[in-house]
Image: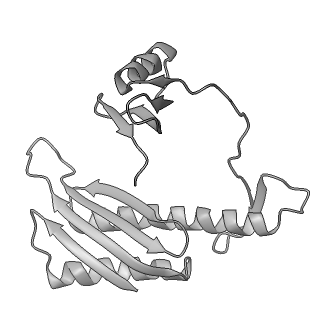
Amino acid sequence: MQTIIKGKNLEITEALRRYAEEKIHKLEKYLDRMHKAEVEMSVERNPKISNNHCVEVTIFSNGPIIRAKESATDMYQAIDLVNDKLERQVKRLKRKRINRSHQGSNQKGKNFISLEGKEKEEIEEPRIVKTKSFLLKPMTPEEATLQMELLGHDFFVFINAETEQTNVVYRRKDGNYGLIEPGV
């Protein structure tokens, strides 16, 4: 697997590079079709941010792209945290794949797995419990944002009156709004 390690506001030492590569390569035992991993390490210069060491990892495989980002007071700790998060995501993905291959069972939505020497544990998988359908109306992104606010939702799907394509507006964590448009 190809591993690309980049640094932002930080010089990547050989020890740091080796540590990150070892952690990422351990994920291959869960996801055998990984072909590329990008690791971006950065240090925030703002003194008010205590967890200023950030690590973002993107894993490209034949299946879905997996991404995780974590921050800590130390770069090695941030690498450990992001690796733990990626491991949980990869295990969840693998459980879903196993669950799909055994869909004929009576235990729909439930999955029994062995967790490293522990007793078998029942895990409830999330599933779609409600479906909504609605008319998509042509409107501007500003009108869609207003409609989203009036409904009290975190996102809103609409047809952009200017481009005549389906778009999504959403509320960002920083309080602003985002617009998702289909790519070309």
Q: Quadrant of the N terminus?
A: bottom left
Which of the two residues, 112 or 121, is positioned nearer the viewer here? 112
- Residue at the (53%, 23%) spot, across then down: 137
Picture coordinates of residue 144, whole percent (x, y): 43, 23
Q: How is the image coloured?
A: one colour
Image quarter for residue 139?
top left
Report whether 69 appears left or right of 126. left
Picture coordinates of residue 98, whole percent (x, y): 73, 69
Q: Quadrant of the C terminus?
A: bottom left
Image quarter for residue 37?
bottom left
Report whether 10 appears left or right of 108. left
- Relative to 130, does residue 128 appear above or below in the rendering? below
Which of the two residues, 118 or 57, is positioned nearer the viewer here? 57
- Relative to 84, does residue 46 appear above or below in the rendering? above
Picture coordinates of residue 88, whole percent (x, y): 52, 62
Residue 113 in view of the camera: no
- Residue at the (9%, 46%) spot, across then down: 46
Which of the two residues, 182 or 4, is positioned nearer the viewer here? 182
- Relative to 69, does residue 97 appear above or below in the rendering? below
Report whether 39 appears left or right of 47. right
- Residue at the (68%, 47%) spot, across then down: 126
Picture coordinates of residue 32, whole percent (x, y): 55, 82
- Relative to 4, does residue 103 appear above or below in the rendering? above
- Residue at the (56%, 77%) spot, across then down: 30
Which of the two residues, 69 or 80, is positioned nearer the viewer here? 69
Residue 160 in view of the camera: yes
Q: How many marks?
A: 0
Image quarter for residue 129?
top right
